[in-house]
Structure formats: C-alpha cells, structure tokens
Amino acid sequence: MTKRLLPAVTLIASLFFVHAAVAGGDVASGKVLAYTCLGCHGIESYRNAYPSFRVPRLGGQQDEYLVAALRAYRNNKRPHPTMQAHGNSLSDQDMEDLAAFFQGEEAVLDSVTKDSVGGLEAARACLACHGEGGDTVIPKPATLSGQQQSYLVHALNQYRDGRRSGTVMSVFAATLIDEDIASLATFYSKQAGLHTSPITE
Ligand code: HEC
Ligand code: HEC
C-alpha cells in the first residue's frame, strides 16, 4: 500500500468503528424519536407517581441494554403501562435509533472494582457482571453507576418479587434483604456514570 492511500484507509476504518459502536442505530433519527421520551426522561426530578421513584437515567446507558429493556416492555416481561405503550408503538429500528441516541458516543460502564466496593459485602456478588466484564451475559447487564437511587431500589424489588423476570437478576435479587437493597442502591447511585439526557431542540 502506498503512503498516499493510508490516510483514506484510516478514515474509512475509523468511520466503520464509530458506526459499529452504535449497533446499527441512527443517532439523528433517535434524537427526533426521543422528543416524547424526554418529557419524562429529560427531567432530572421527574417521578413515577405510584410507586414513587425517579424515572431512570438513560444518558450513557449501553445501547444493547436499552434495546433489551424496550423489547421487554413490548413483550410484557416488564410491567409499566406507559412504557409498554411506547414499546408497542416502536419498531425494532426505532428502538436501535433511540438506543444509539441515548447511549451517546460511548457507553458508560460500571466503574465499580473490588477496592471501591470496600465494606459493602452485598456488592461483591455484583462485580462479576456489573463492573468486571459481564460482556458474555445475555441480555447485557445494565450500567448501574450514576443511576437514580430510588429507581435502583424499585428495580431490585421487582426482580426479587418476580414482577420483572426472565433474567439472571432474579437469582441475585432473591438473596437480598431490604437493608442490602437500600445500601446497594445508594452505593451505585453515588458512582460517576449515567446522566439525565438534556432536552434539546
Ligand atoms: C410518562 C413518562 C415516561 C415517558 C414519556 C417515557 N418513559 Fe421510559 N420510563 C418511565 C418510567 C416511570 C420507567 C420505569 C418503569 C418501570 O418500572 O420499569 C421508564 C423506563 C424506561 C426504560 C428502562 C430503563 C432501565 O434502566 O431499565 C427505558 C429504556 C425507557 N424508559 C425508554 C423510554 C423511551 C425510549 C421513551 C420514548 C419513546 C420513553 N421511555 C418514554 C417513564 C417514561
Ligand atoms: C450473572 C451476572 C449478574 C450479576 C452477578 C448481577 N447482575 Fe444485575 N443485571 C444483570 C443483567 C443481565 C441485567 C439486565 C437484566 C434485564 O434485562 O432485566 C441486570 C440488571 C440489573 C439491574 C436493573 C438495572 C436497570 O436499569 O433497570 C439492577 C438494579 C441490577 N442488575 C443490580 C445488581 C446488583 C445490585 C447485583 C449484586 C447483588 C447484581 N445486579 C448482580 C446481570 C447480573
């Protein structure tokens, strides 16, 4: 290969990798579709009325997990009337586009390590998937770092009581007592990570 060709090849290769990172989703189309979502997910203090918890942060969440979550609402594997209605109205391509938009340029990964877990015994069991790998687990583990505290409590309760099922999480949540759930949720919510996607034009 001649020296003159190299820059062009590098450019094409880098375009390919940027594209691969968003798994087929189109960010611009996702941004348009996200307009209705941001009425709830774009407002930092927005709460679900009953039970009361803050809506999950989606900014930086991994695209594969976002698509899996939207499919779970569509398949009635996760209960929530509004989100099920959204799940039903979105095509597979819409979901990928939305996921690419919310994930942004790069997925935020859990930053939790053996050292940062410190004395929180209950969190050791989470490390294998949330933090140190987990890439081989299907569906992909969600990023927890920076998520809303009250939403994490809600999600863990749903796995524990079976309202959210069909994944490995049921097994791990089953062993948790209320105090563990509260401290795990506080611990993860304080890590740098996910953010509330701002409402833009
Ligand atoms: C009326 C407010 C509201 C609107 C509008 C809304 N959501 Fe949600 N969303 C919620 C709430 C509340 C939850 C948590 C529901 C539960 O208990 O599972 C949620 C959960 C989610 C989750 C799961 C997050 C996780 O960490 O598992 C995703 C993904 C999501 N919404 C995407 C969207 C998208 C995409 C749109 C627009 C097409 C949208 N939402 C519109 C309120 C809303
Ligand atoms: C074997 C791998 C594995 C282990 C260990 C594990 N998780 Fe998970 N976790 C997952 C997967 C996969 C998902 C996505 C499941 C789904 O789609 O509902 C998930 C999802 C979650 C969610 C939902 C996030 C959201 O945005 O709704 C929470 C909260 C969570 N895990 C907390 C924990 C905690 C706390 C521990 C330790 C006690 C733990 N997990 C251990 C694999 C794991």
Image (cartoon, rainbow, N blue to C red):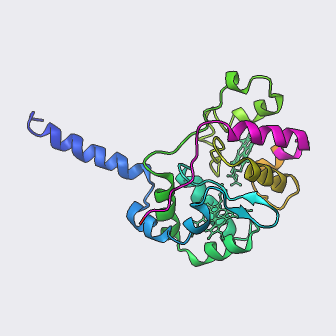
Which quarter of the rendered picture does the C terminus lie within?
Answer: bottom left
Above or below, 91 against 196 in this view is below
- Find residue 186 and report its horizontal and vertical position in percent: 76, 39
As rendered, which of 76 and 53 lies closer to the eye? 53
As rendered, which of 151 and 162 lies closer to the eye? 151
Which quarter of the rendered picture does the N terminus lie within?
Answer: top left
Residue under the point 84% across and 53% down = 157
Apparent side of residue 127 relative to residue 177 in the rendered image (left or right): left
Image-quadrant location for residue 48? bottom right
Residue under the point 50% across and 70% down = 35
The residue segment tinted magenta is 173-200
Apparent side of residue 13 relative to residue 184 in the rendered image (left or right): left
2 inside magenta stretch? no
Residue under the point 68% across and 37% down = 190
Residue under the point 61% across and 37% down = 110
- Find residue 21 and report its horizontal and vertical position in percent: 43, 49
Above or below, 43 against 36 in this view is above
Residue located farthest toward the right when viewing the structure as drawn: 177
Above or below, 120 against 92 in this view is above
187 inside magenta stretch? yes
Apparent side of residue 114 relative to residue 42 in the rendered image (left or right): right
Image-quadrant location for residue 13? top left
- Find residue 165 and report its horizontal and vertical position in percent: 79, 58
- Find residue 172 and report its horizontal and vertical position in percent: 81, 43
As rendered, which of 44 and 187 lies closer to the eye? 44
**Image region (quadrant) for ligand 1:** bottom right
